[in-house]
Image: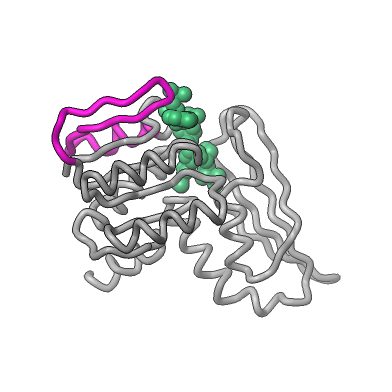
């Protein structure tokens, strides 16, 4: 697979390059500028900043490349841009490319109804270089529960990403905790999404759908 990488100098950009060692990096975009080997990428990975999205979408259109986007902090107008691009190419968008968080999303979507009258709060902890709060994952998990709730963000040390979804009533506490031990989990998930997107029909896919497709095949 030939891939482009928007945000190649960043923490995730570096992890993606390690996970994609058997594939060819042919295009990069960073704050400093862009580079290309002159050929077409099959897929473009974007782990950068929402302000890069117009350029990412332009590059996908120019090359007919699929898109895998993990960048957080997207606005409604950004999602509109992704839906428009997805008429032409496959787009996989997720605020979290770990298997655990996507399994938790399915659990919450199915079982939150049992706790409709319980209190619900989400606590997320990330490294002190993270720019956005609450995390994209916290927003995604809140959406999966089907109701708004208070979200709390800690920015300390080098934590790759912890999420805790806590339900409680007078007599019980039920909490779901996910901890990414290494940032590499996101990069391996993104690789799985890229392999899917490179051959998928145009459309906007979640990572959960990518995982469900591979379960159906096995
Ligand atoms: N979906 C998921 O599973 C995950 C998503 N993320 C998300 O990925 C994104 C990146 O995270 P992380 O790698 O930690 O961040 P970093 O700050 O380490 O990296 C950001 C990258 O984007 C580039 N960049 C930023 N702004 C611009 C711009 N205006 N134009 C061009 N390039 C730009 C930077 O370039 P330069 O170095 O030149 O400044 C850098 O390469 C975040 O939104 C984060 O939340 C992170 C982990 C997992
Ligand atoms: O910026 C990060 O590091 C992470 N960002 C994503 C988010 O905002 O949810 C995913 C992961 O938790 C790491």
Residue depicted at x 41% and y 44%: 186
Residue 135 shows in this picture = yes
Residue 13, x across and y down, in percent: 37, 32
In the rendered image, the quadrant that contains the C terminus is bottom left
Residue 163, x across and y down, in percent: 61, 50
Total label count? 0
Residue depicted at x 18% and y 38%: 23
Residue 47, x across and y down, in percent: 42, 39
Q: Is residue 181 left or right of residue 196?
A: right
Residue depicted at x 27% and y 65%: 214
Specify the quadrant of the image occupied by residue 76.
Answer: bottom right
Q: Is residue 173 left or right of residue 74?
A: right
Residue depicted at x 70% and y 60%: 166
Residue 65, x across and y down, in percent: 24, 49
Q: Which of 69 and 56 lies nearest the eye of the viewer? A: 56
Q: Residue furthest right?
A: 170
Residue 181 shows in this picture = no
Specify the quadrant of the image occupied by residue 119.
Answer: bottom right
Q: Residue furthest top?
A: 32
Q: Residue furthest left?
A: 39
Give the magenta-colored segment's residue range: 13-40
């Amino acid at each position: 697979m030939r891939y482009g990488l928007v945000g190649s100098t960043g923490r995730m950009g570096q992890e993606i390059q390690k996970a994609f060692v058997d594939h060819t990096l042919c295009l990069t975009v960073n704050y400093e500028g862009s580079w290309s080997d002159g050929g077409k990428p099959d897929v473009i990975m974007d782990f950068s900043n929402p302000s890069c999205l117009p350029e990412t979408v332009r590059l996908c259109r120019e090359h007919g490349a699929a898109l895998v986007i993990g960048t957080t902090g997207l606005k409604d107008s950004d999602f509109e841009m992704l839906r428009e691009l997805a008429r032409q190419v496959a787009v996989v968008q997720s605020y979290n490319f770990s298997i655990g968080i996507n399994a938790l999303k399915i659990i919450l979507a199915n079982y939150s109804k049992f706790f409709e009258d319980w209190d619900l709060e989400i606590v997320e902890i990330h490294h002190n270089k993270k720019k956005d709060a609450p995390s994209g994952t916290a927003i995604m998990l809140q959406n999966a529960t089907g109701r708004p709730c208070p979200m709390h963000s800690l920015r300390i040390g080098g934590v790759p990403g912890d999420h805790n979804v806590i339900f409680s009533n007078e007599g019980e506490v039920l909490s779901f905790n996910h901890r990414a031990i290494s940032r590499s989990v996101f990069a391996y998930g993104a690789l799985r999404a890229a392999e899917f997107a490179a051959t998928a029909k145009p459309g906007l896919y979640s990572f959960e759908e990518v995982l469900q497709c591979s379960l159906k095949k096995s």
